[in-house]
Every structure is written in C-alpha cells, then in structure tokens.
Image (spheres, grey):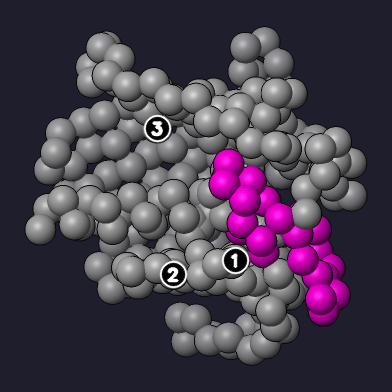
C-alpha cells in the first residue's frame, strides 16, 4: 500500500500535473515574447489543495538568484501529503525559461532522498543523480531531440505565452515528448469562485490544466491523468514587490 501511494505522489510531482504549459518546440526557439516578466517578478506565491488526499502544494517564485556565477530564475515547489514531503528548487534561464537545474529533497515513510537534475540545454540532456545522505546511489542520463522543459513548472511557464487562439498546439519534451493543445476556453469554478480560463490538454492522456484568462493568468486547476486521479485546486495567491 505504501509503495502504491508513493508511486501516486510521484505521479503528482512529475506529471505536473503538472507541471507540465504546450508545444512544437524548435531546436533553436526564439525567446518568449514576454520573457522580461521573469526578471520583473520577484515574489509570487500560489497555494493549492491536492484532491482527493487533502494534501497541499505551493508554488513560490523567488526571483533572480546566482547559479554558478550566472543569473537564474528560482522557483520553489513544495508538496505535503500525509507523511510525504517534497521540496524542489527549480532554476531556469531568466530569458528562455528553460530549466537549468533542479535540487530536490524528498522525505516520507521510505526515508529521505536528495535528487539533483542538471540540464544541458545545448546538448539536450539531463543528468539525474540520487543520494542517500552524501552517498550517490544512482545516476541516469536522459537525452532528447530538443530543449527540455520541467514537468512541475510547465503549466506556470505557459502563462508567458498569453493570449492564445483556438487551435493552438505545441510539443514539449520533459524529456519525453508530450503534445499540449488549447482544448477550450471555458468557465471553471474553483473554491467557490467562477473564472474564465484557457484549458490545455496534454496527450496522450497526460494531464489537463486551466489558466485564468485574466491577468495574472494563474494556473487554477491541474488535473492528472492515467491510473491515479488527482487535482491541484488553487486556494491562495499573492504577489509582492516587483523589480
């Protein structure tokens, strides 16, 4: 039972449900039209309830930090479900939004594990290293045929491409290819409030997520597909001190 629940939570984190925001990414894509938003925004928090397990998740955009002597945009995504806790520090390029590094601490009934993902966006690879304490227990190198996005922040990344037109479709690599399309512009009720939202669907059967049509274009709901069913439902939002 513990094993099944652990797999379930892993699906929540990696599918992001996330994240992943959806697309035909070209080998050398142009920077998003609103890339400067990553520089201007210094602190943003979006909190969610995880249904049906009644867990919580929080997306926190910290702002610009230094990573190996270069500027990077830092996002912290934290998940709590029962005795499971997952904290991910996600560093991205402040212009292209492509992920550079993920530093992840996972703890629960099975113990504690530290995971580091190092992305080489020039060669389209990601190296995943797992540690127990200071000892490396596993290392995996994954390769794609184009830029690699992070599943957790995929729906949040998608905000930069607003507005969208019907028929909009792209392909993301995380690193497996997922086609994401704008499936509808519809009314959605979350937390007792009604919103007009863009609905995106990832295929085949990966996830659905809804982004508010009005500024600040917040991901309102993220719904996972597959064997395990779950949803992230927004329950709080705040933004502080833009640069």
Q: Is residue 205 visible?
A: yes
Which of pointers 2 and 3 indicates the residue nearer the eye?
2
Please state the extent of the stretch shown in magenta in the rendering.
155-180
Q: Quadrant of residue 75?
A: top right
Residue under label 2 = 225
Q: Please tell me which residue lies in front, 101 or 201.
A: 201
Q: Earlier in the sequence, mark 1 or mark 3?
A: 3
CA–CA distance between discs 2 and 3? Answer: 24 Å
Mark number displayed over residue 71: none
Q: Quadrant of the N terminus?
A: bottom left
CA–CA distance between discs 1 and 3? Answer: 24 Å
Mark number displayed over residue 104: 3
Residue at 22%, 51% in the rendered image: 6
Residue at 89%, 41% in the rendered image: 30
Q: Quadrant of residue 126?
A: top right
Return the x and y of residue 214 as percentages of the image width and height.
Answer: 75, 73
């Amino acid at each position: 039972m513990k094993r099944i629940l652990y797999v379930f939570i892993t699906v929540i984190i990696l599918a992001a449900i996330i994240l992943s925001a959806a697309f035909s990414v070209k080998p050398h894509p142009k920077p998003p039209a609103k890339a400067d938003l990553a520089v201007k925004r210094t602190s943003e928090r979006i909190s969610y309830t995880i249904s049906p397990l009644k867990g919580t998740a929080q997306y926190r955009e910290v702002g610009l930090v230094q990573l190996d002597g270069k500027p990077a945009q830092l996002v912290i995504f934290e998940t709590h479900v029962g005795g499971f806790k997952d904290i991910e520090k996600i560093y991205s390029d402040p212009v292209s939004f492509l992920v550079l590094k993920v530093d992840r601490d996972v703890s629960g009934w099975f113990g504690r594990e530290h995971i580091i993902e190092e992305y080489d966006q020039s060669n389209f690879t990601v190296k995943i290293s797992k540690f127990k304490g200071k000892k490396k227990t596993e290392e995996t190198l994954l390769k794609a045929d184009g830029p690699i996005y992070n599943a957790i922040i995929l729906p949040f990344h998608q905000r930069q491409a607003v507005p969208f037109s019907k028929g909009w479709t792209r392909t993301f690599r995380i690193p497996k290819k997922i086609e994401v399309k704008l499936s509808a512009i519809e009314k959605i009720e979350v937390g007792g409030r009604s919103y007009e939202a863009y609905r995106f669907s990832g295929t085949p059967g990966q996830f659905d997520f809804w982004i508010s049509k009005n500024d600040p274009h917040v991901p309102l709901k993220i719904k996972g597909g597959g064997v395990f069913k779950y949803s992230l439902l927004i329950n709080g939002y705040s933004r502080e001190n833009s640069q």
